Image: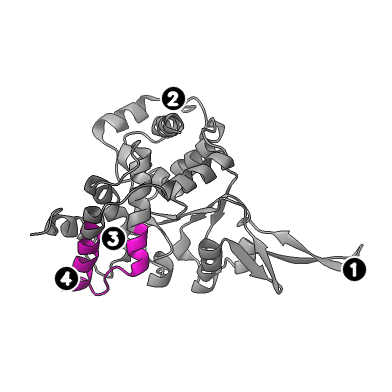
Amino acid sequence: MQSKIDAALAQINQTVLGKEKQIRLALCCLLSGGHLLLEDLPGMGKTTLAHALAGVMGLSFRRVQFTSDLLPADILGGSVFDPSTGKFHFHKGPIFSQVLMADEINRATPRTQSALLEAMEEGQVSMDGETRPLPEPFFVIATQNPADLAGTFPLPESQTDRFLMCLSLGYPSHAAERELLAQTESRGKSTTDSDPCFSVADLQQWREQLLQVHLSEAVLDYVQRLIHCTRQSPHIKLGLSPRGGLAIVRSARCYALMGGRDYVTPDDVQAVFVAVADHRLCSDDKELGKWILDSVDVLPG
């Protein structure tokens, strides 16, 4: 399984240049069974990363551009009358895919945003009095532009909490940008031509292995002190919920397994903490996660 992880990371790193840390975290989010929120300026590679993740995992991919006039039925689907049979037939919307990219999710109305809630949490859609399961696995990658907020509807805390991680790619390094500029327009293989490194069975096996990754009492104590710090700090209005704590543990387990270990270290917790915690903390400071890590010692006392 480790060779498949390395192959997947290598392929994505060839597509999205110079973002090894963010790519590893994004793959960790998918392998953990969570959902990913990408906050960044246009043109930073968010869509390219989403395509590459779906490609290396061999998963079906759909993209929806969220706008103010988008309706829930445009995502979920709806019943259409068939005159030949005299019956209504349900036509599945783009949400019935294994990887759904919700592009600029904060430009849709709260009614449309909330249509994703049940799907993201329960893996199913309820319409016309019937519950329909979504494909397995089901992974949502949502994007939003933090700089242009005119005409947007900010995601409420109840919805941002549904995302396991929030990442920002940022500008490329000088070397990565030079390599990107030197490439031809074709850039070799398209992101849709990625060679799948995982199967659905591999992914299910991986998630079963996550439950076997060991967390020592010392690591659990460290996680609890980080959570406690978010709840006691005067700079944070709302600290991490129990669901946020579970997200840290799940992500750290997956990060450790990606590193070829069956046990979690404090380094694994630190690697995922900012991506898991920052968007859950109700504060205007966007670097609180890093501050909390610097404030809490690995060993007590």
Q: Amino acid at mark 3?
A: Asp
Q: Amino acid at mark 1?
A: Gly
Q: Amino acid at mark 2?
A: Thr
Looking at the image, is mark 2 or mark 3 nearer the viewer? Answer: 3
Horizontal side of 195 relative to 7 (left or right) equals: right
181 or 2: which is nearer to us? 2
The residue located at (32%, 57%) in the rendering is: 248
Give the labeled residue for mark 4.
233
The residue located at (64%, 60%) in the rendering is: 133
Q: Earlier in the sequence, mark 3 or mark 1?
A: 1
| Residue 32 at x, y percent in the picture | 43, 50
160 or 28: which is nearer to us? 28
Give the labeled residue for mark 3.
278
Q: Amino acid at mark 4?
A: Ser
Mark 4: which secondary structure? Answer: loop
Mark 2: which secondary structure? Answer: loop
278 or 266: which is nearer to us? 266
Residue 96 belongs to magenta span: no
Q: Which segment is the magenta one?
A: 222-247
Q: Earlier in the sequence, mark 4 or mark 2?
A: 2
Q: CA distance from mark 2 to mark 1?
A: 54 Å
Q: Eyeballing the image, is 155 above or below 223?
A: below
Q: Eyeballing the image, is 246 above or below 271?
A: below
Which residue occupies the extreme right position in the image?
Answer: 84
Instruction: Assess whether mark 2 and mark 4 are in contact (beta carbons under 8 angstroms).
Output: no
Q: Quadrant of the C terminus?
A: bottom left
Q: Earlier in the sequence, mark 4 or mark 1?
A: 1
Q: Quadrant of residue 192?
A: top right
Give the labeled residue for mark 1.
86
Residue 10 visible in the displayed image:
yes
- Rendered image: mark on residue 184: 2
